[in-house]
C-alpha cells in the first residue's frame, strides 16, 4: 500500500510539473506579444538589490504592517517548507525517512517547526482579514470588491491545509520517535507530540503516510489549478512578482511615480517633429502595450490595496485601478490567440476569440468614464505590493484617445487651445504674467529687463512663477508671499516674466503628448540658452515637469519647491517667524509634492516653526494622502460622476478639528477653498484654507 501511494504521488508530481511548465510557457508567450521595451534592464546589480529588499524585506507589503507581517511568514513558508514536501514523499514509503544530511539536524527541524507554525498563524490572520472585508458585506467599500474571491479562498485554504499537515506531521514524527520532553526541535509541535504519543507504532506509521499523502495532494492540486488558471494572480504572483519587481521602471526600487514615460514605439521615443511611419501614439489596442505592461497586468494579485486608496473609487466613480488592471489582463488573454495567430488563420479561430479581438480597448474593455476619472494621484502605484504601474497604463490609453481618436472630454478642448495659442491653460495674455510685480513694494528682477542675455552670476535662483502663480488669484498671493520672503532673506532671484510659458503638465497628463513636447521644448530651449541651473517653483506640478520630466528632452536643472527653500531659510535663521499664528492647522500633502516627489518634511518643518500653531495630522497624510481632485488634468474637467473628491478631502481635514487647512499647491488651494464653501462639507464659520508661504509671511510680519 505504501508503494501504491508513493507511485500515485510520483506520477501526479510529474504531471503537475509538466502542466506547470506548459503554463509558464503560455504566460511567457502572452507577455511577449507586447511591444519591445529596452528600458527595463539597466543597472542590473541595483535591480537584484531592489528585488531582495522588496521580497525578503517585504518593504511594499509592510506599508500595511499587520498584513505585511502575516504575509511575510506565508511567503517564507512557501519556499522554506519545500523540504517538508520532499520529506512527505519519502514518508509515504517509510515513516522514518528524512532528507539526507539536514533531515536529522536539530536546527533544521526547529526551523521547520517554527516556520510551519508561523505560516499557519499567518494564513489564519489573512483569512480572517479577508472574511471581515467580504464584498458581500461591505459592497464597494471592500477592497476585494470585484476580485475573484473563489481563487483567493482556494489559495488560502490550500496553505491552511498544508500548514496543518506540516504541524501534524511534526507531532506524529515526535510521537513515533518517542520524544518524551519539550525540545527546541518541537518548540510548537510538542503539545501534538504529547497528544499523539498514546497511539501504537503501526497507527502512527499509517497516520504519517496518510497525512503526508494529504499534504502532497493539496500541494500538487494547487499546481494543477494554477496551470488551469494562468490569470490567477493571487497564486501566480508567487512567481511573477519577482520578475515584475526586477523589471520595474526604477531600478533603485522607487515606485513608478513622478515623471511619465515618453511616448515610445518598440522602445524608442517617438520624434514628434518627424514621427516614423509605424509610430504608435499611446495604446489603442492590447498588443500595443509593452511586454512589461502585459507582465504587470498578469501579476496583479487582486488584493485591492490600490482600489481602497483611489480617490475616484472612494467618491463613487467607476474607476478602480484594480479593475482597470484585471480588465486589461482578461482582454489580453482572451485576445492573445488572435494576436498570436497568422493573419491567414485568424478567420478559423473560435467565435469568442474573434469577438474579443473586435472589441475596442477604450469603449468596450475600458469605459471612457473610467479612463478620464483618474487624477494620476499615484495612491494606487504607491500601494501596489507587486509594483504595478497603473498611471502609465492609464495615460498611455489617454494618449491614443487624444492624439489618434480625438476622443476626450469636451472641456479639455479649451485648455488645449489656450495652451497652444496663449501658452497657458487660462488663455491669458503673456504680458499679464508680471502684473503681480506691480502689487508688491520691493524690487523683483525680471530677466531681460536690463538687457540680460544670460542669468547674471549674482542670481542664485530662477523663480518659476507658473501659470497659476501668475493668473489665479489665490496662487498670486502665494507668488507674492514667496517673493517677499525670499527678498527678506536676501536671496537673489529672478523671474522670466512674459518669457515664461506653461510647462505642459496638464496637457501631458491629459494625454496630449504632442502639445506637452512643444511646450517643454520651447521652455528648455530658453532655459538652456540663458544658462538656468537652479529653479524654485510654488507649483508641485511645475516642479515635477521641470525637474523630473524635462531631462527626457534635454533640460537638466536643480528644481525645488518653495517649501524646501523656505524651511532651509527658517532653519538657517534667515527668516524668523515670531508673530504667533494661534490656530490649529492641518496640512494637506499635494500628490505631486508628496507621493510623486517625496517632499513630506519641509512643509511640516515650516508649520512646526510657526509660533502658536497647533499641528494636527489627517488620517490620510504623507504617502497615503488623499488627492484634492485636480491632478491628471482633472482641474480642467467637470466632475459629473459620484461625489466630489475635493469635498471628501475637505471633510477629512475638518475631521481633525483644525481651523486652518494648510496647502502647498495652487490647485489644492483652489479645490479645497471651493470645497469649504459647500453646504455638504459644513465647514465651521472661520475655517480657512491657507498656503504655507502666506502663513509664514503672517508670522514674519509684526502683529
Ligand atoms: S492614480 Fe489615483 S485616481 Fe488614478 S487610479 Fe490611481 S489611485 Fe485612482
Ligand atoms: S494592482 Fe496591485 S494593489 Fe491593485 S489589486 Fe493588483 S496587486 Fe493589488
Image (tube, rainbow, N blue to C red):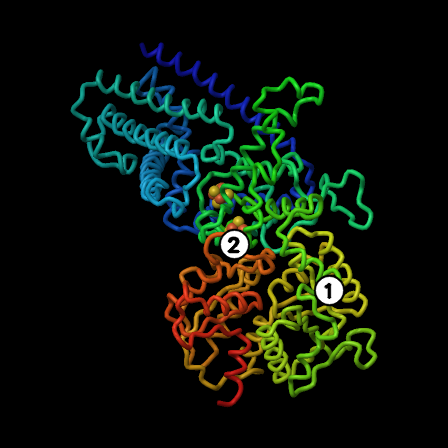
Q: Which residue is mark 2?
A: 640
Could you tell me residue 254's position as x and y percent? 57, 52
Q: Nearer the viewer, mark 1 or mark 2?
A: 2
Residue located 62% across and 62% down the image: 541
Say whether residue 55 is visible: no
Instruction: Report which quarter residue 415 is drawn in.
Output: bottom right
Vertical order, 615 against 242 (above or below): below
User: In the current view of this chain or complex, which residue is farthest to the bottom?
Assistant: 702
Q: CA distance from mark 1 to mark 2?
A: 28 Å
Q: Nearer the viewer, residue 116 or 482?
A: 482
Instruction: Report which quarter residue 447 is drawn in.
Output: bottom right
Q: Which residue is mark 1?
A: 423
Residue located 51% across and 23% down the image: 20
Vertical order, 566 against 383 (above or below): below
SS of the residue under disc 2: loop
* The N terminus lies in quadrant: top left
Q: Nearer the viewer, residue 381 or 149?
A: 149
Could you tell me residue 658's position as x and y percent? 40, 72
SS of the residue under disc 1: loop
Vertical order, 84 against 643 (above or below): above
Could you tell me residue 299's position as x and y percent? 52, 37
Mark sitting earlier along the chain (1/2):
1
Could you tell me residue 138's position as x and y percent? 35, 45
Amino acid at each position: 500500500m505504501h508503494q501504491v501511494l508513493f507511485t500515485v504521488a510520483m506520477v501526479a508530481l510529474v504531471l503537475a510539473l509538466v502542466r506547470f511548465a506548459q503554463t509558464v510557457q503560455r504566460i511567457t508567450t502572452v507577455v511577449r506579444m507586447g511591444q519591445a521595451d529596452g528600458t527595463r534592464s539597466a543597472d542590473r546589480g541595483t535591480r537584484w538589490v531592489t528585488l531582495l529588499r522588496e521580497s525578503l524585506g517585504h518593504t511594499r507589503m509592510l506599508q500595511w504592517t499587520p498584513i505585511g507581517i502575516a504575509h511575510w511568514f506565508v511567503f517564507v513558508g512557501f519556499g522554506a517548507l519545500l523540504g517538508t514536501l520532499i520529506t512527505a514523499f519519502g514518508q509515504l514509503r517509510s515513516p522514518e525517512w528524512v532528507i539526507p544530511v539536514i533531515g536529522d539536524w536539530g536546527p533544521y527541524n526547529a526551523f521547520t517547526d517554527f516556520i510551519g507554525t508561523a505560516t499557519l498563524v499567518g494564513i489564519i490572520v489573512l483569512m480572517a482579514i479577508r472574511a471581515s472585508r467580504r464584498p458581500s458585506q461591505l459592497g464597494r467599500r471592500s477592497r476585494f470588491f470585484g476580485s475573484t474571491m473563489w481563487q483567493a479562498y482556494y489559495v488560502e485554504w490550500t496553505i491552511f491545509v498544508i500548514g496543518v499537515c506540516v504541524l501534524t506531521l511534526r507531532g506524529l514524527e515526535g510521537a513515533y520517535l518517542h520524544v518524551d520532553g519539550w525540545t527546541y526541535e518541537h518548540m510548537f509541535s510538542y503539545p501534538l507530540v504529547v497528544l499523539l504519543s498514546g497511539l501504537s507504532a503501526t497507527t502512527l506509521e499509517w497516520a504519517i503516510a496518510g497525512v503526508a499523502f494529504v499534504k502532497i495532494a493539496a500541494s500538487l492540486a494547487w499546481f494543477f489549478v494554477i496551470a488551469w488558471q494562468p490569470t490567477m494572480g493571487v497564486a501566480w504572483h508567487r512567481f511573477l512578482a519577482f520578475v515584475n519587481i526586477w523589471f520595474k521602471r526604477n531600478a533603485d526600487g522607487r515606485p513608478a511615480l513622478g515623471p511619465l514615460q515618453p511616448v515610445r514605439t518598440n522602445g524608442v521615443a517617438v520624434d514628434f517633429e518627424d514621427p516614423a511611419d509605424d509610430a504608435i501614439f499611446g495604446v489603442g489596442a492590447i498588443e500595443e502595450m509593452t511586454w512589461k505592461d502585459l507582465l504587470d497586468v498578469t501579476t496583479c494579485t487582486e488584493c485591492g490595496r490600490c482600489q481602497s486608496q483611489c480617490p475616484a473609487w472612494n467618491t463613487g466613480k467607476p474607476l478602480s485601478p484594480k479593475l482597470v488592471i484585471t480588465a486589461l489582463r482578461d482582454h489580453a488573454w482572451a485576445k492573445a490567440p488572435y494576436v498570436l495567430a497568422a493573419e491567414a488563420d485568424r478567420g478559423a479561430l473560435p467565435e469568442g476569440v474573434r469577438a474579443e479581438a473586435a472589441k475596442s480597448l477604450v469603449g468596450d474593455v475600458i469605459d471612457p468614464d473610467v479612463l478620464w476619472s483618474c487624477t494620476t494621484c499615484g495612491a494606487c502605484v504607491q500601494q501596489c505590493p507587486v509594483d504595478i504601474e497603473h498611471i502609465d497604463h492609464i495615460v498611455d490609453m489617454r494618449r491614443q484617445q487624444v492624439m489618434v481618436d480625438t476622443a476626450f472630454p469636451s472641456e479639455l478642448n479649451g485648455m488645449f487651445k489656450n495652451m497652444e495659442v496663449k501658452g497657458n491653460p487660462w488663455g491669458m495674455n503673456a504680458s499679464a504674467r508680471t502684473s503681480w510685480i506691480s502689487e508688491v513694494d520691493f524690487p523683483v528682477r525680471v530677466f531681460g529687463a536690463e538687457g540680460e542675455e544670460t542669468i547674471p552670476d549674482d542670481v542664485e535662483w530662477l523663480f518659476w512663477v507658473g501659470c497659476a502663480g501668475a493668473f489665479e488669484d489665490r496662487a498670486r498671493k502665494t507668488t507674492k508671499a514667496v517673493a517677499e520672503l525670499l527678498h527678506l532673506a536676501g536671496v537673489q532671484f529672478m523671474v522670466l516674466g512674459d518669457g515664461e510659458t506653461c510647462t505642459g503638465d496638464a496637457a501631458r497628463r491629459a494625454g496630449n503628448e504632442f502639445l506637452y513636447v512643444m511646450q517643454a521644448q520651447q521652455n528648455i530651449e530658453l532655459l538652456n540658452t540663458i544658462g538656468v541651473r537652479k529653479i524654485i517653483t510654488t507649483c508641485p506640478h511645475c516642479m515635477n515637469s521641470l525637474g523630473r520630466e524635462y531631462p527626457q528632452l534635454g533640460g537638466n536643472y536643480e528644481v525645488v519647491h518653495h517649501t524646501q527653500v523656505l524651511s532651509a531659510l527658517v532653519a538657517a535663521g534667515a527668516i524668523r517667524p515670531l508673530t504667533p499664528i494661534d490656530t490649529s492647522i492641518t496640512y494637506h500633502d499635494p500628490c505631486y509634492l508628496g507621493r510623486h516627489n517625496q517632499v513630506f518634511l519641509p512643509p511640516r518643518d515650516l508649520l512646526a516653526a510657526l509660533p502658536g500653531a497647533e499641528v494636527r495630522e489627517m488620517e490620510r497624510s504623507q504617502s497615503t494622502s488623499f488627492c484634492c481632485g485636480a491632478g491628471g488634468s482633472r482641474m480642467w474637467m467637470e466632475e459629473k460622476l459620484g461625489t466630489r473628491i475635493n469635498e471628501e478631502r475637505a471633510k477629512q481635514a475638518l475631521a481633525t478639528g483644525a481651523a486652518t487647512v494648510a496647502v502647498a499647491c495652487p490647485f489644492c488651494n483652489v479645490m479645497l477653498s471651493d470645497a469649504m464653501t459647500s453646504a455638504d462639507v459644513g465647514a465651521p464659520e472661520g475655517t480657512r484654507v491657507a498656503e504655507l508661504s502666506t502663513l509664514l509671511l503672517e508670522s514674519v510680519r509684526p502683529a
